[in-house]
Image (tube, helix red, strand yellow):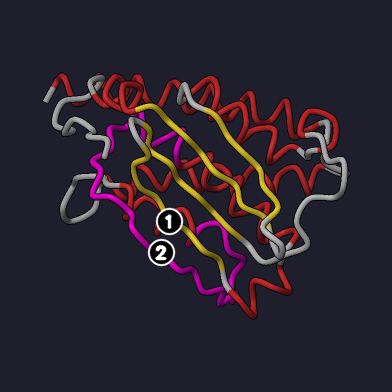
Amino acid sequence: MDHVVRILCHRCKNDLATVANLLALRAGFASDPLELAHSMERRIAALSAVYSHRAGPVGDMNLRGLCREVWQRAQNPGEAVRVSTTDLPDLDLSLRLASPLALWLYEVFDNALEHGAASLLQSGLELNSGWRQDQLYLRVRDWGPGLAPGFDLERDAGAGLKVAQAVALYDLGGRMDLTNAHPGLKVELFVPAREIDHLNQMECGAKPAHGA
């Protein structure tokens, strides 16, 4: 029990540091304090999905359940956007792995809802995942306008995609790719299996990842 409490305290400390960093970043993009508060409320809710999922009847976290929890928090009240999920592996997640994944998913979902809202109401969102050699990939596709010609992530992206890129690189040791899908946009996260195993080993009980 003491070991579990220490893990939870350490994870909460790190998540609070993440919230502080997000506040500093979002402050430069928000037009007023109300917009900043609203955007942060949604992101904190996405991070809380990790703990809600962990506190559920089963107690274990997996990728499929986390995607569902974050998607529910990303939508506005009353929205009925359909999400199609295929090939999501039965992957156990530690708190250390689930928190950055939750934030990455939220930012990508929010970007799709912001820029492709009209098309999403008609066509929905596509989410799939699997193993490609020794990497886990997680792909989110919308059916919106896609990227503008000459789009540069560092120069042109808003705060959400910048956060998603930073999470992919620095928290998950992977990478993020953006590709126009004609129509729509594909956002893909690639995380090496060794990084998943390393992050899962920070908490007991998660099974090793296995690439296909």
Q: Which mark is residue 85?
A: 2
Which structural element holds mark 2?
A: strand
Q: Secondary structure at mark 1?
A: strand
- Residue 136 % position (x, y): 37, 38
Q: Is residue 180 magenta?
A: no
Give coordinates of residue 114: x percent, y percent. 73, 59
Above or below for 208 versus 72: above
Looking at numbered disc 2 in the image, what kind of residue is underneath it? Thr
Cα–Cα gap, marks 1 and 2? 5 Å
Q: Residue at x 87, y 40 (%)?
A: 150
Residue on which disc 1 sits: 128
**Whole-percent x, y for residue 105 in the image:** 51, 46
Q: Amino acid at mark 1?
A: Asn
Circle 1 Cα neighbour tier, 10 Å, few/some/many (<14 / 14–19 / ≥20) = some
Of residue 1 and residue 202, the one placed in the foreground of this image is 202
Residue closest to the eye, 140 or 72: 140
At x 58%, y 35%, the residue is 176
Rendered image quadrant of residue 69 = bottom left
- Image quadrant containing the N terminus: top left
Determine whether, in the image, residue 122 is placed left or right of residue 51.
right
